Image: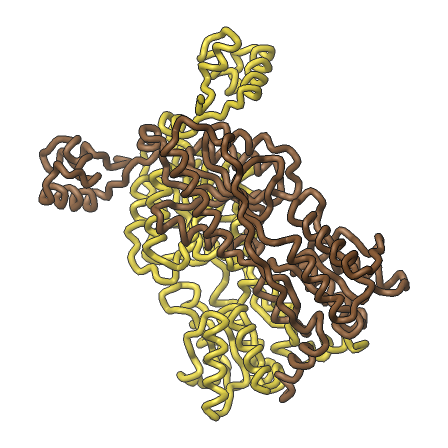
Chain colours: A brown, B yellow
Amino acid sequence: MKAQTTIKDIAKALNISPSTVSRALKDHPDISQKTKDAVNQVAEELDYHPNTIAQSLRKSRSNTIGVVVPELVHHFFASVISGIEDVAYKAGYRVVICQTNEDVEREKQNVSALISSRVDGILCSMTKETRDFKHFKSVQKRNIPLIFFDRIANEVKADSVVVQDYEGAFQAVEHLISQGCRRIAHFKGPDSLLITKQRINGFHDAMREHKLPVEQDLIIEADNRDLARATIRQMVESGAPLPDGIFCVNDNVAVGALLQLREMGVKVPEQVKIIGFEDDVTFTQLTDPQISSVVQPSFEMGQLATHMFLDELARKESHPDKILEIKTPRIEVLKTKVVVRGSSCEKVWEEEKNRRVQE
Amino acid sequence: MKAQTTIKDIAKALNISPSTVSRALKDHPDISQKTKDAVNQVAEELDYHPNTIAQSLRKSRSNTIGVVVPELVHHFFASVISGIEDVAYKAGYRVVICQTNEDVEREKQNVSALISSRVDGILCSMTKETRDFKHFKSVQKRNIPLIFFDRIANEVKADSVVVQDYEGAFQAVEHLISQGCRRIAHFKGPDSLLITKQRINGFHDAMREHKLPVEQDLIIEADNRDLARATIRQMVESGAPLPDGIFCVNDNVAVGALLQLREMGVKVPEQVKIIGFEDDVTFTQLTDPQISSVVQPSFEMGQLATHMFLDELARKESHPDKILEIKTPRIEVLKTKVVVRGSSCEKVWEEEKNRRVQE
């Protein structure tokens, strides 16, 4: 059985030369429309697929963008990818996605594999554990555009898109303070990630701005649902006075804290107010009370990252002699917004209850 | 600037032949450990990446599995992909993922692109709209293993993994009947998908088994949250008596129905009992009441699909002369399980309320 139809097969079927077929398939002006139509029809009939591997060896273009993300189960990343595809497909690029599962070794493996398969660019959000950046520098050395989004590395000079993590955190804490909170806890992410570091800084600066003391034992690393639950359990069981507000590094942490407090008989928002930072829109409005959050434009982040890749590719192709390092990295910062729901505001919580008072 | 380090560069640096370098990199027994160590060290220093495109032209292997799924925002598919990666990486394969966004044209484009980039196999879950199967037959004609999971096509003879959609639906409806429901509605998916057709059949057969009439206007196509909300709104506003139970084609539909009923003053589970079919575990336990569901082993589905690909590849390589068509397709069916929560059972709903009675 024959594995692949080639240009030669089409040429033979039409009794014309392979180079005519090749040019017809590329819509070359020297070839008549009649010939082009015939070639395209036979190509369709013989189920011809261009061998992109051989093509990419010749013109070193694969028309593929590689995307590397930590975890696809996070709604946030799925949404960024939709934004990437939205721009990429319109520009004639296809998108292949690799997931690292927060494993640096797999991140290195994925990046190396994408380099080897000659993608035209890599869009990446790092793992929590990435401390060594050699694999990214290796991308840049090859003059392949590398764009970071969300989780970026200051250590690598690359174009990147982030959101206002610092400002969002600052505003979230100010909101808790405006609701009467004085002893505010922060369930934080790892210091290794710039985004979580920014959120920690925003927390500290908002407390300082409002002359509120930061209690060190109320700053706890807990960046998933289970850790949030365990942290709340410890806090309640210790018998020490609870904080009156918690700023959580993401929505999954906020939901874990909310459910655990509720199960242990602590009232949210009356006794403890909670606000998260958007990572999953699918559930923040399902709980009682609903969860306040700092929302971020994830779809737009994907769109913008892809536009930056296209710009970078165009720049590179118009100045093939210049190397990337000479350019100052372009950093785009997208706006965040505090969305107040019942978990951080008694008035809104009353409204949420009234909306289903008929029960 | 030099784009890629080659084997020749390593050979030159060590003053040995390129073929020695090549064999050393492949851990060939004829090469001394000392030479291998030296070669690997220089390869590391010069940041050498094997050119897999050139390699795959030579040995027609890319060590890549292509995965095509409808939507990554669905937790179900993200979980299947984790299962695929779990087996694939251990077997030395990397995984590239393409998303179709329920668009048949993009599905064709993705499949064609994966063929062109010479993946070793394709694991696919079809779009809702796929009615034409030429692109899949095109994969098989090339002797590339093609495995379907979840959303499969009877029209294509291929190995596939599904869950007990019929049995799961049957059991879900029997559960509603055991809870006292007599007028049961089904919010169904499109008839084009085998899985949703199976769920419809399970619904009908369970009703027939229990000698309950099926009311045609209680079978409504509504396969996402918004459609479920709109359907409930119409039902309530029409003033006609509501069904006492709803079997929903997935959890997103169940959550939409639940929230809309609650907002319109209808009590769940007291007046209407609801059960879904698992597509997202992240939120079924967040609502009041929590949502009953038919749970399916998505991670295991991904693992099994990948094992089937590896089996198929081994079979193909040991009998390169035989074509795929002669084999009877292997269909694996994974077990589902009804998980009862408050949305379909008053007793469980009381327990859920008691668990936070301290409030």
**Would you identify the image quadrant in which residue A34 lies?**
top left
Looking at the picture, how far across and down is residue A350, in whole percent?
69, 81
In the figure, is residue A315 to the left or right of A173? left
Q: Residue furthest top?
A: B15
Above or below, comparing residue B231 to residue A255 in the picture: below
Task: Report whether residue B322 is seen.
Answer: yes
Q: B251 or A173, which is in the foreground? A: A173
Which quadrant holds the N terminus of chain A? top left
Q: Residue at x 41, y 34 (%)?
A: A316
Task: Report whether residue B334 is seen.
Answer: no
Q: Residue at x 55, y 76 (%)?
A: B174
Looking at the picture, how far across and down is residue A315, in whole percent?
40, 37
Above or below, comparing residue A197 to residue A348 in the picture: above
Q: B286 or A65, which is in the foreground? A: A65
Q: Residue at x 48, y 65 (%)?
A: B165
Above or below, comparing residue A50 to residue B52 in the picture: below
Q: A226 or A308, which is in the foreground? A: A308
Which quadrant holds the C terminus of chain A? bottom right
Looking at the picture, how far across and down is residue A352, in whole percent?
65, 79
